[in-house]
Amino acid sequence: MRNKARSAVLSLALAATLAIPAVVSADSVQANPADETTPPIVTPFSVGNQQPLTTVSAATSIVPAYFSVPAGYGHGKFYFLNNGTSNLTVTMTHSSGLEYIAATVKPGAAYTWRSTADYPQGMRGGDYTISFHCSSGVNAKWSAFASNSVTEANA
């Protein structure tokens, strides 16, 4: 009887060992594929939010992208790379109208903005619109990361 109980406990432990990582590593991001007509839209992770390096390319001079910061995860890092031939202006505005980023990135240059420098208490949670403006059409890449850790945002 004791061996059956031990066997049952070991079986449950093995099942939990296999099942728990599968649940934890399940994708919680749903993003539309990036193309010229559909900007990337990201659904927040349960423990923050991340937008992988994404190309933004269009013949038009203004291209929007969208990012959400979950409440409590207001320490962000945003990276922009201008692959175009003229200056790229990047602005990021919260749905309340508050502008967080207004930067000009020269052709071939990159710019990284960390919220910890300007907003040490963190950014507002909610939806953000990132606008890319370029006189010769937009050709850029961007990535973003929201965390509840100042250390991670500064990395």
Image: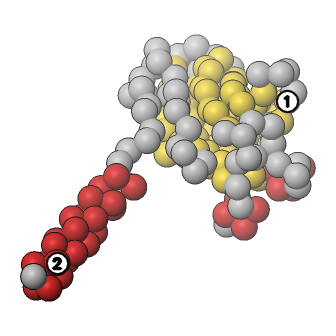
Q: Residue flagged by tag 1: what amino acid is it? A: Glu
| Quarter of the view holding residue 143 | top right
The spot of residue 76 in percent (x, y) is 71, 49
Scheme of colours in the image: secondary structure
Judging by the rendered image, the residue that carries numbered circle 2 is 5
SS for callout 2: helix
Q: Quadrant of the C terminus?
A: bottom right
The spot of residue 26 in percent (x, y) is 35, 48
Judging by the rendered image, the residue that carries numbered circle 1 is 99
The spot of residue 92 in percent (x, y) is 75, 31
Residue at 71% x, 61% y: name it.
149
In the figure, is residue 53 to the left or right of 27? right
> In front here: 152 or 71?
71
> In front here: 147 or 139?
147
Question: Residue furthest toward the bottom?
Answer: 2
Q: Quadrant of the N terminus?
A: bottom left
Residue at 52% x, 32% y: name it.
42
Evaluate if marks 2 and 1 touch, with contact meaning CB atoms under 8 Å apart. no
| Quarter of the view holding residue 103 | top right
SS for callout 1: strand
In the figure, is residue 11 to the left or right of 65? left
The spot of residue 70 in percent (x, y) is 66, 39
Residue 5, placed above or below residue 77: below
Earlier in the chain: of badge 2 and badge 1, it is: 2
Residue 59 visible to an observer of this rendering: yes
Disc 2/disc 1 C-alpha distance (Å): 62 Å
Residue at 66% x, 48% y: name it.
146
Residue 110 visible to an observer of this rendering: no
